[in-house]
Image (cartoon, grey):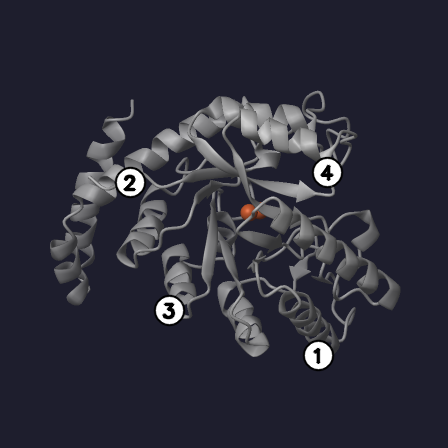
Amino acid sequence: MTDLPVFGAGIWHFATYKDRYATDGYGPPVGLLEQIDRAGAVGDLSVVDLNWPFAGYEGTLEEVKDALKRNNLTAIAITPEIYTRDFVKGSLTNPDPGVRKQAMELLHQATELAKDLGCSYVKLWPGQDGWDYPFQVNYHDIWNLALDGLKELVSAHPDINFVIEYKPREPRVKIIFPNVARTLLGIEKIGLPNLGILLDFGHSLYGQETPADAAQLAIDYNRLFAIDVNDNLRGWDDDMVVGSVHLVETFEFFHTLRKNNWEGVWQLDQFPFREDSVEAAKQAIQFLKAVHHALDVLDDEALAAAQASHDALAAQKLVQKVLLSSMAEIV
Ligand code: FE
Ligand code: FE
């Protein structure tokens, strides 16, 4: 049996959430240090991705570091909040040069914090960079602002990696990095070694990609730096517990990573609105351990032979055999 991967989670997994209906939130607010303690309570998590600035947090950075340490956690990433109220018309692509400058300053500060915390990467999620209406933006200009801004940022910090997490929509109706192909196109045009992709399985799913194919493409261009996993019903970024809907495609995704000897963190990006956050993470990790076991026992040679002749039924039989038996072990 192969060694288990490192498991991680976005720290927001352990927060409570608001939306445009439950405007008071789905539960009482959970402070940053308590979120970290909850992440620690999962038991199998080793790393977390932290949003920054730490919204609503009034303590010191030392206290954050202490909280991570007492829970045997390290920060794998900082996610700078370039998608909050200041940036409703975009961050690096904002029409106002002053706001673009503000975004760049925030990104540089977040990068310095990421280095201080020993993170592997800075995660860029340009969720407000895009458009909503036809004729709203000049597509040439907004694309070039995105690439020029990224180049300026990433080239200034050759000692740390940056990842773009693509997503088809939400909050903008159209986001400037919506899929693997367009994101790779931008990254290749920028041409820097320390800029890659964070492939969020759920974003790929509801963007109507085949997530395993998206992963393979990013790997073939040496740009798959990180992954997030979760699940959804393919119409929206539901951020449900991983494996709850798309069992076979989740397995195919991890099989693609295994086949390519990809050894990054298996990171949860779930939003358990109505579930207990610690239990949701525990259950997700139990599922991921079963996936890992299924990968160990899959007959790779027989699968390769089936794929060589595009034999769908033979491939399904091999997959179902290991997947369903491995799932039975976790009950
Ligand atoms: Fe994500
Ligand atoms: Fe998402």
**Spatial distance from mark 3 to mark 2, Cα to Cα?**
22 Å
How many marks are shown on the rendered structure? 4
**Mark 4 or mark 2: which is in front?**
4
Q: Residue at x 48, y 43 (%)?
A: 233
The disc label shown at residue 313, or none = none
Q: Dot 2: within a 10 Å radius of its alpha carbon, few (fewer than 14), some, or many (20 or more) residues?
A: many
Residue carrying label 3: 220
**Spatial distance from mark 4 to mark 1, Cα to Cα?**
34 Å
Instruction: Give yes or no for contact between labels 3 and 2 (Cβ–Cβ under 8 Å).
Output: no
Instruction: Give yes or no for contact between labels 2 and 1 (Cβ–Cβ under 8 Å).
Output: no
Ligand 2 within 8 Å, label 1 CB: no
The disc label shown at residue 292, or none = 2
Instruction: State the image quarter where residue 65 is shown.
Output: top right
Q: Dot 4: within a 10 Å radius of its alpha carbon, few (fewer than 14), some, or many (20 or more) residues?
A: some
**Spatial distance from mark 2 to mark 1, Cα to Cα?**
44 Å
Say what secondary structure mark 1 lies in: helix
Q: Reading the chain from its start, which is encountered first: label 1 or label 3?
A: 1
Q: Is residue 290 left or right of residue 59?
A: left
Q: Reading the chain from its start, which is encountered first: label 3 or label 4?
A: 4
Q: Reading the chain from its start, which is encountered first: label 4 or label 2?
A: 4
Image: 130 above or below 39:
below
Say what secondary structure mark 2 lies in: helix
Q: Is residue 259 left or right of residue 283?
A: left
Closer-to-camera residue (41/311): 41
**Spatial distance from mark 3 to mark 4, Cα to Cα?**
36 Å
Q: Position of residue 151 (x, y in %)?
A: 65, 71
**Mark 4 or mark 1: which is in front?**
4
Residue carrying label 1: 140
